[in-house]
Image: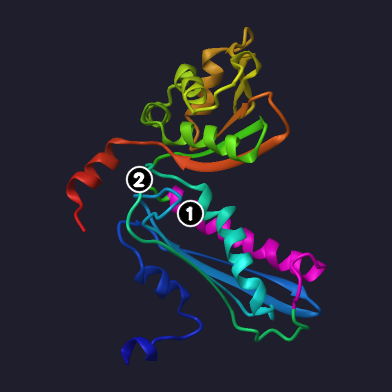
Amino acid sequence: PAALADAQQEHWARAAEGIMTTDTIPKAFSTQLQIGGATVSVTGISKGAGMIRPNMATMLGFLATDACIAPALMRQLVRELADQSFNRITIDGDTSTNDSFVLLATHKAQHAPITSLDSAEGSALKAALLQVSQQLAQAIVRDGEGATKFITVRVEGGKTGEECRQVAYAIAHSPLVKTAFFASDPNLGRILAAVGYAGIADLDQTLIDLYLDDVHVAVQGGRNPAYREEDGQRVMKQSEITVRVVLGRGDAADTVWTCDLSHDYVTINADYRS
């Protein structure tokens, strides 16, 4: 009864706090858009800080909108949103026994029902939902246990999106790569090694280029002659870093988000027991 009595529309922040475990901050985002002359709201909360990797991670996500959308579209929509947000994050490469991402639509907004995600209205709603979903997912990475840096891993030039993700996760899951980021060490060999052992059988290493933000560090699989160590270290000292790998195999690309691996991660998980 107390929980039901506390179910107020302005209590999103309290709900975000209520689902926290090893999180250090509550995670909530909201946006609005116009559909058919009506103001539509999108609001969500999430929780997670460790044991985060797609396929049953210790995370929860709840996303709600007052948009009028055909119920038949919801299953497809929630899967597409998850695939481009919560299924693109990793903190430690570990998983748990449960996770949930729930999408709700109340149909309270005063506009004509959306019956196709390909319509202008459907595309606009999906874009707003995806924006909040990615903010919620990235907030989990930013609050990763012991994390000090937010890292975007972008792999381009693959034959398929699947192999791009395969390479991106090899980098994002590597303890050697993640500890190098914590130390602000531009250890190019660790990143290139992860690309190599990602499992692409016919990978041609002489086609690979590697960038740290705006710094071109490797050309055709080897060190860029123009690369300077101080440029790489400048990027590695930032709190937000983009690693971009160009495979030179095709036109596919994909992105995952991760963090560094610090002393505090070990301390938290040595002391914490659920």
Horizontal and vertical percent for residue 53? Answer: 42, 48
Residue 87, placed above or below residue 111 = above
Question: What amino acid is labelled 2 in the image?
Answer: Asp
Q: Give the range drawn in magenta.
A: 114-142
Residue 191, placed above or below residue 76 = above
Residue 44: mark in rendering: none
Nearer the camera: disc 1 or disc 2: 2
Residue 139: mark in rendering: 1
For mark 1, does the 10 Å Cα neighbourhood hold few (<14), some (14 to 19), or many (20 or more) residues? Answer: many
Question: What amino acid is labelled 1 in the image?
Answer: Ala
Task: Residue under label 2, please give it.
Answer: 94
Residue 90 location, quadrant: top left
214 or 95: nearer the viewer: 95
Horizontal and vertical percent for residue 29? Answer: 54, 65
101 or 130: nearer the viewer: 101
CA separation in Å, label 1 and label 2: 18 Å
Name the residue at 69% across, 76% down: 40
89 or 249: nearer the viewer: 249
Secondary structure at badge 1 equals helix
Considering every residue shown, the one lying at the far top of the view is: 225
Placement of the C terminus among the 4 image quadrants: bottom left
